[in-house]
Image: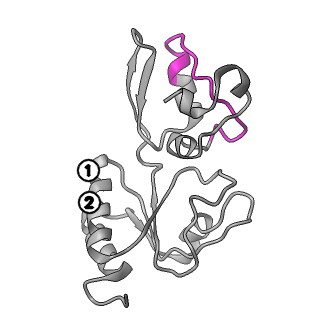
Amino acid sequence: MRPTATTGPSAALARIDAVLGPGGVLRAPEDLAGFGRDVIGLYRGRPPAVVRPKTAEQVAAVVRACRAAGVAMVPQGGNTGFCGGAMPDDSGTQVIVALAGLNRVRDIDLANGAITVEAGCTLAQIQAAAAAHDRLFPVSHGGEGSSQIGGNIATNAGGNAVLRHGNMREQV
């Protein structure tokens, strides 16, 4: 499908700009550079923009705008993965949805040993929140200072304590 005035990235981004406001959409090549390649340089993409929602409601609005315009979205967290799952292709038509703004610890349920967090929380942030309540979040790996829980869940991350505590799926 060929983009028109009501379809394609430009149409979606016009709607998204209105929802996210100033700084919510990155378009300048220098701002996009770090988002278009993975941590090891194996995968590269060419996003027309990076959108940065900060609430679930904003994410929903981004999804609605992209769907209405026929634009594919690529969620991206800390961009620390080795599998290329957070990379757009090089068509210049796939918008990156950066989840770093969704970084709140919502609840710690001590009675049930559960923590509720947003997708953009870093693994280190979750470990610190658990430790502050004398609890352990056992997933640990080299990227924990920048890797985000959404990506850890999506890739079933393992890490240093995987033999004792299991992969991410055992923690969710």
**Residue carrying label 1:** 57
Is residue 14 visible from the viewing direction of this image?
Answer: no
Instruction: Name the residue: 30% across, 69% down.
Output: 67
* Residue 132, percent from left and from top: 52, 16
The region drawn magenta spans: 129-145
* Residue 112, percent from left and from top: 41, 12
Q: Quadrant of residue 118?
A: top left
Q: Main secondary structure of the magenta part?
A: loop
Is residue 148 visible from the viewing direction of this image?
Answer: yes
Q: Is residue 111 left or right of residue 90?
A: left
The three-letter amino acid code for the residue at tag 1 is Glu
Instruction: Name the residue: 55% across, 33% down.
Output: 169
Q: Quadrant of the N terminus?
A: bottom left
| Distance of label 2 from label 1 (alpha carbons) | 6 Å
Instruction: Name the residue: 30% across, 80% down.
Output: 11
Count neighbours of disc 1 (C-alpha within 10 A) and say few if under 14, some if 14 to 19, many if 20 or more: few
Assess whether mark 1 and mark 2 are in contact (beta carbons under 8 angstroms).
yes
Numbered disc 1: secondary structure: helix
* Image height of 44 relative to 102, above or below: below
Q: Is residue 115 left or right of residue 160?
A: left
Q: Is residue 154 left or right of residue 107?
A: right
* Residue 12, percent from left and from top: 31, 74
Q: Is residue 122 left or right of residue 67?
A: right
Residue 130 is a magenta residue: yes
**Residue carrying label 2:** 61
In this figure, which colouring scheme has been used for the structure? one colour
Q: Nearer the viewer, residue 31 or 122?
A: 122
Q: Quadrant of residue 139?
A: top right
